[in-house]
Amino acid sequence: MKLFFAGLVATATAVCAVAAPVQAASVASVQAAPVNPVKALKAQLVPGKGVKIAESSGITLDFTVDDQAMQVQVSTRTVGTLAFAKGNVAAADLRVRMSSRQKRSNPPYRVIAEGRNAYVTNAGIAKALPSGLSWIQSKASGRENAILGMGVTPADLQFMLDNASEVTTGQYQGTATLADFRHDKSAGEGDVEFHLYFDEHNLLTRTVVDTTAYPDGDTAAYDQMVFHTDTKYADWGAKVKIAAPAANKVISEKKLNAKIRKAVIKAGYPESGPF
């Protein structure tokens, strides 16, 4: 991931007792309405600007094995910076830590994403790689880099606003089906509940999204999946420049032999890759 119409313009304070009515009307006329939150977001999505994010997310998977109910929980904490291009996220520089109830917390790692590429490192990974190398490069299999999907797009924002109501000034709450929320009829059965928080400039400060997904048939490997994502935004409009690591410090994930791959995974490299 990301949206609200601010409250009405505050009532003007009492004008000077000696001011003529026409003067008071003139003062009131310059009280501009808050910028539409979608327009406010679009105004930020320009080259050279960015935003800081801090996201806590988790997935809880319920399934049944031999008539015995079981559950797996995985949590992820991500903090860092997104850099914008015109209309979208162009790059990201993030610190990621993953943990599960069944397993101790993995060592955190840093990932830089741009284009279809993701570059991962931490002290243990760098130590496990051949001398002089410190980053592992992975390339997204499709056109889209999932890491750059963090944050809320203007289209996402508009959809949520259209399906939400204001619960208090600057806070909105809404619901949608999973298929509608993802704009994908094949997304399956499920429900989404979301909360949106905005500052006085109608820029997002926080989004909380809870999704419950159900299998389509009896052959599914799970009974229910619950996703929770809580994302906070800060420093909208900050000057941001994120560059890929130097080429001579990078090795492709495809070039890792079995021994090195085992070592970097133990050091914190995500076993299924950064995407």
Image (cartoon, rainbow, N blue to C red):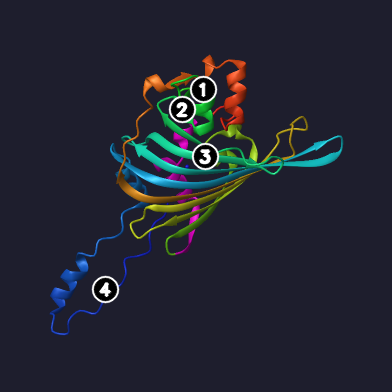
Mark sitting earlier along the chain (4/2): 4
**Circle 3: is it few (<14), some (14-19), or many (20+) Cα within 10 Å?**
many
The residue indicated by pointer 2 is: 118
**Circle 1: is it few (<14), some (14-19), or many (20+) Cα within 10 Å?**
some
Whether residue 146 is in magenta: the answer is: yes
- Residues rendered magenta in the picture: 145-168
Mark sitting earlier along the chain (1/2): 2
In-front residue for pair 89/121: 121
Q: CA distance from mark 1 to mark 4?
A: 64 Å
Q: Which residue is at the far right? A: 67
Disc 1 versus disc 2: nearer the observer: 1
| Amino acid residing under circle 1 | Leu
Q: Position of residue 255 (x, y in %)?
A: 52, 14
The image shows residue 166, relative to residue 52, as above or below, that is below
Q: CA distance from mark 1 to mark 2?
A: 17 Å
The image shows residue 95, relative to residue 273, as above or below, that is below
Disc 1 versus disc 4: nearer the observer: 1
Mark sitting earlier along the chain (1/4): 4
Say if mark 2 contacts mark 3, CB within 8 Å: no
The residue indicated by pointer 1 is: 129
Whether residue 136 is in magenta: the answer is: no
Disc 4 versus disc 2: nearer the observer: 2
Mark sitting earlier along the chain (1/3): 3
Q: Which mark is residue 12?
A: 4
**Circle 2: is it few (<14), some (14-19), or many (20+) Cα within 10 Å?**
many
Secondary structure of the residue carrying tag 2 is strand
136 on left or right of 48: right
111 on left or right of 97: left
Q: Residue at x 48, y 57 (%)?
A: 172
